[in-house]
Image (spheres, rainbow, N blue to C red):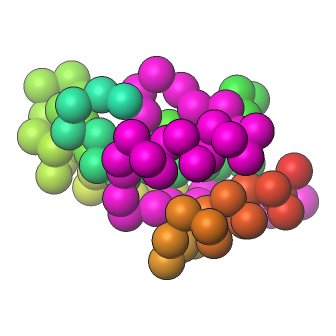
Amino acid sequence: MEDKTFILKENSKEIRQKINDAGIPLCVCAEFVDSDWLDYSTSLYEKSVHGNGYSFEGMTNEASRALFLQEVKNPIYCKDVDEFIEKIKSAK
């Protein structure tokens, strides 16, 4: 099976709660300040939603996000949290 990375270009307490209510685990990094995107990768051993965009190893938020996008092959952008949840569940 091809590895997939789903990206949701938004993050809020309400969105995280909806993901949690759907039975999908969230990494603590999803709640970091400046974690303004969420992502889920089928290639990771830990099957949880991660935050993205927070300052990582001294990088700016933009540089951190750019590095992430550089490492992801064929990202799948979701239009809303419902599509994000649907794609995660269908990939399991």
Instruction: Give the residue displayed 12% in from the left and 25% down from the top.
Output: 58
Q: Is residue 41 above or below residue 75?
A: above
Give x and y (percent) for residue 37. 36, 52
Judge left or right: residue 68 versus residue 16.
left
Q: Is residue 34 above or below residue 83?
A: above
Instruction: Give the residue displayed 16% in from the left and 52% down from the top.
Output: 62
Q: Residue furthest bottom?
A: 79
Check if residue 84 falls in the magenta segment: no
Give x and y (percent) for residue 24. 71, 39
Check if residue 26 falls in the magenta segment: yes
Q: Quadrant of residue 1?
A: bottom right
Q: Which contiguous range is marked in magenta?
A: 1-30
Judge left or right: residue 59 versus residue 7.
left
Instruction: Give the residue displayed 67% in from the left and 32% down from the top.
Output: 25
Give x and y (percent) for residue 41. 64, 48
Q: Quadrant of residue 13?
A: top left
